[in-house]
Amino acid sequence: MRIRFLHTEAFRLSAIYAGIFALSVLVLGSVVFVMTDRAFRDQVVEFSRADIAAMRNGYAAQGIAEAQEVLEQIMSAPGASDFFLLQKDGKRVAGNLPPMAPRSGIVSLPGTGPDHDILGAGDFLAPGLYVYAGSDLQRVHAAEREILQTLAWLFALAMLLAIGGGTLVSRSFLQRSDAMARACRAIMDGDLKARIPVRGAHDELDRLAGTINEMLDRIAALMENVRQVTNDIAHDLRTPVSHLRQRLERAREESHEAKDYAEALTAAIEKTDEILQLFASLLRIAQIEGGARRADFTQIALGPLVTHVRDVFGAVAEAGGHHLELKLKTEVSIRGDRALIIQLLSNLIENAILHTPEGTRITLLLSRTEDRAVITVNDDGPGVPREEHAKLFQRLYRREASRSRPGYGLGLALVAAIAELHNADIALRDDGAPGLGITLSFPVTLPSPQAAD
């Protein structure tokens, strides 16, 4: 049976790390072993040379007899070398080794067994007078075996910990990936409210789950918008389409001359154009909400832009008996689509002109709050009841007081779509002052000096 966690990416990474760690332990253990072996052997050789130096001093003081006495004293003292030889002209004078071929420097001799080889040093005290001192390496080999065993146990423990840790990490990763899969399957089965659980550890899986949940929220919102638009279209188009059908029926029944038919056709074409304009506006909103226009974003200086909008709509406002005023409190730049920002401000100003009486003052204000560029369109007209604020930016929503005016309730919906495309926040004034105020705050991309009020 296939064990699932053994085939997870987390377990593969853990196995790779465990392999790298094992290789590192082997290399480090080999280096430690070689250095320890060298240190032990150097110490043995140093003891041997110290013993030879003592015999050399004795020989220099009183001759071969003193050298022999020093050798016997060293052999009887604890901590001395194990094997000695003092020979003259190839014949042993003292020591516990048989005569050997004289060799100076470090000399290794076979011992009584595999682990009992002898390491020491040999030298000439005088011509024909050779001395050797060495030690059995059995203690060195025993210490090295203990070191190897310790390293082996440490290696085994480290591997067990690595495998255990990899198993735990893999199981945890598998549980979280299974939770993600269950949530996705639930969504595919129709439960659009299902979301991927977030553990709160702020790790990469939490960030991935949070991003996917945001995407699902966005998809759910878009689907809700589609449902709402479908319902609104079905509701709001029923009236103009019914009127169009009634006019055509009346023309068929009551028209008797070519002039009557021409007038009926002209009215029908005008009504059809209104319906086509409604669909074009809906498609434009859908295109903006899709985010395709972000590819055309450039750096925009808002000061000249709002000044241009004021210059364009100043005369229009005056013609309708309104006064449009511009207040620039700062110069600030954002990234965005210049044409869409102009469209946004145009809709807000047109909305204020259309739905307020003559004599209303409309204010276009540009300011800055920390890292946000703030554009506000205020008017001192009759305003909108607070309970209707949340509905103003819905597609095809029209207040009862506005249904006698031309339009389909898409102007502020387009404003909301453009604001969302630019990551801007929309807020309606709720301070009790007369009129309606709509504030949009855009993220600033370049630092700008504050201008004097």
Image (cartoon, grey):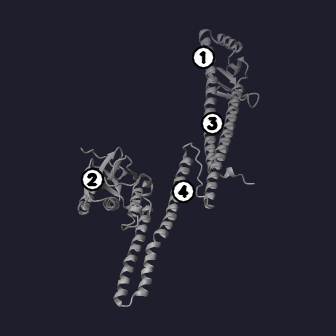
* Residue in view at x 34 percent, y 48 percent: 433
What is the C-alpha distance between the residues marked 3 and 1? 34 Å
Residue type at the position of mark 3: Ser
- Residue 364 pos. (x, y %): 29, 53
The secondary structure type at the circle numbered 1 is helix
Mark 3 or mark 1: name the one nearer the start of the chain.
Answer: 3
What is the C-alpha distance between the residues marked 2 and 4? 37 Å
Badge 1: few (under 14), some or many (20 or more) residues near its Cα, within 10 Å? Answer: some
Label annotation for residue 30: 3
* Residue corresponding to mark 4: 216
Residue type at the position of mark 4: Leu
- Residue 64 pos. (x, y %): 65, 12
Location of residue 147 with respect to 186 vertically, above or below: above
Q: Nearer the viewer, residue 81 or 447?
A: 447
Q: Nearer the viewer, residue 93 or 1?
A: 1
Tell me the mark number nearer the camera, choosing from 4 and 1: 4
Label annotation for residue 53: 1
* Residue corresponding to mark 2: 303
